[in-house]
Every structure is written in C-alpha cells, then in structure tokens.
Image (cartoon, rainbow, N blue to C red):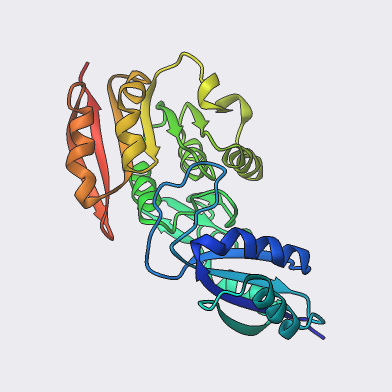
Amino acid sequence: MTASWQQLIIQTTATYVDDICECLQMLGVIAVTLQDAGDEPLFEPAPGTTPCWTQTQIIALFAPDVDLNYIIATVKDQFEITELNFQCKTLVEQNWQQQLQQEFTPMCFGKRLWIYPSWHTPPNPNTCNVMLDPGLAFGTGTHPTTALCLAWLDRHLQANNTVIDYGCGSGVLAIAAAKLGAKHVWATDNDTQALQATQDNATRNHIDPSQFTIVEPTKFPPVTCDVLLANILANPLIELATMLVKLVKKNGIIILSGMLKHQRDEVIRAYQPWCKLIAEDDKAQWICLNLIKLS
C-alpha cells in the first residue's frame, strides 16, 4: 500500500516566514518549501540565502499520522496573525515520483545535444548526451537562459576550444562543452552547493578530470580561454565585466546570458570597451549575447 503524505500550505507575509518555519520544525515537519504567492520574481538572491517574497506560501510536508488540525491551531495560537490562510492536501508518495518523471523528459538543443534525466535512456545514443537530474543547483536546461547557451554550444563550439563556465550552477554548460569536444573546461561558481553539484554531475557523465577543472572564483588559475560562458543574470554580468573579459583570449568569444530584454543595452555598454556584439538570441523575454573580444 502506498503511503499518503500530508501537505499544509500556509499563505503569509515575509515578516512571519522565518518564525512560522521555526515553529513548524518544532512540530515535526519533514520538509518546508517557500513559493512566491504574489507574482514577485526574485532574480538575484545572494548565495546561501533563502528568497522571501512579500506574499509567501509556506508548503510544509508532514507524515500521514500527524494531526494537521492541531498543527494549524498551534500556529494560530503562537502568532495570532489574522492574515494567515491554511490549506490541507493529501499527497501519495508514488505520485511525486511519477510527476517528476513526467515533467523532466529528454530535451534536444540544436542538432546533436541532448539533456536527459537518469530515469530515461538517451533518445539517440549517437548524439551528444548529458545525463542531468533536477537538484539544488540552477540549470537543467529548462530555463530559457540555459537553453540559449546550450543551443549556442551545439551550433558553434569547436573541438579544440578551451572553455570557462563562469557561474556554473549544476555544471550543465560545462559538461555539455566537455562532451561536445572542448579541449579543456573550467567551471566556477561562488556557491559551494553549485560546485558540488557540478562535481557530482561530471562524475555521473564520466567526464575526464584531466580535461575538467572545478574551482572557486577566488582560486581561479591564471588562464585564458577561447569561449567564456556566463549565465549569471544582468547585475553580475555588468559588475564582473572587466574581470570576465580578462579571462578571454583576443578574438575569443563571450556568451552572456541571464538578462531580460530591457537589460540588454546596459549589459552591452559594460563590454563595449573591449568587445563587439556579433549575434544575439532571445527566448521568452530572456536574451543571450554573443560577443567577440577585440583587444
């Protein structure tokens, strides 16, 4: 018999999120997830922080035998907040796995690059296949910014290219570059979870460690590359422009992604002293810039 789990959804404001989560921990919650309840996107949370929206949904998971009426009553008594809303659901454990497997299916980027989860086999074993499951770090190929970078790699990466993936997240771009034949790939991120995810995913994809270096930004070696990928959103792209350009050889390519259409011009201006825009792509309001370093 499949176990049923209980989900308690609490809608509240940012002021009370931390205290309510702490209370739920004391009441034996198994897991807590926060979601935006008011269409208020947070594009650039700091590494290691938990984003909190003005209107937030707290989604709490409890074991089948827990009395949710007692949980609700305790939370109400503890905080005496009139603007709390509660909703209870029953979840079947088996359905979680089925939903996850239905949502994440093999995806093709261009003509030869596939990203597929571990519960699938590669649709075409003769193409370039990257196995990647959804996890903590950003980047499974489903987000438009990642998809744009993967499509560029499929079309343009050369076998003798050296590549830097700056802000590697899950490592999907770095691993794809390695599998497409890059001579050497450096992957870096200021989030330790991202570095661990990249290492795990590289191992699962049998990437040769001698051709694949994972390193913290503060310990980055004095190297330059043929292609630099930076899928890290507009503000970091602008702030890091001088440093990122120095990592690229003359006539090398810089792929910048993670910006919305209205941020495009500001990002281009940050790189104009050294680079020329040679192409760009867009998807669902997101932009990917293709620059060449002139000096």
Quick one: 165 or 241, which is closer to the camera? 241
Quick one: 69 or 185, which is closer to the camera? 69
Q: Is residue 211 visible?
A: yes
Q: Is residue 156 visible?
A: no
On the rendered structure, is 241 left or right of 134?
left
Q: Quadrant of residue 53?
A: bottom left
Q: Quadrant of the C terminus?
A: top left
- Residue 163 coordinates in the image, percent (x, y): 43, 29
**Extreme-top residue of the structure:** 222
Quick one: 128 or 148, which is closer to the camera? 148
Quick one: 224 or 122, which is closer to the camera? 224
Q: Quadrant of residue 232?
A: top left
- Residue 210 coordinates in the image, percent (x, y): 61, 24
Q: Is residue 69 above or below residue 35?
A: below
Q: Residue at x 36, y 36 (%)?
A: 236
Q: Residue at x 29, y 33 (%)?
A: 238
Q: Residue at x 21, y 21 (%)?
A: 274
Q: Is residue 55 above or below residue 51?
A: below
On the rendered structure, is 277 left or right of 198?
left
- Residue 240 coordinates in the image, percent (x, y): 35, 28
Q: Quadrant of the N terminus?
A: bottom right
Q: Quadrant of residue 280?
A: top left
On the rendered structure, is 166 left or right of 252?
right
Q: Residue at x 18, y 32 (%)?
A: 269
Q: Is residue 266 above or below residue 128?
A: above
Q: Is residue 11 above or below residue 135?
A: below
Q: How many marks?
A: 0
- Residue 130 coordinates in the image, percent (x, y): 53, 49
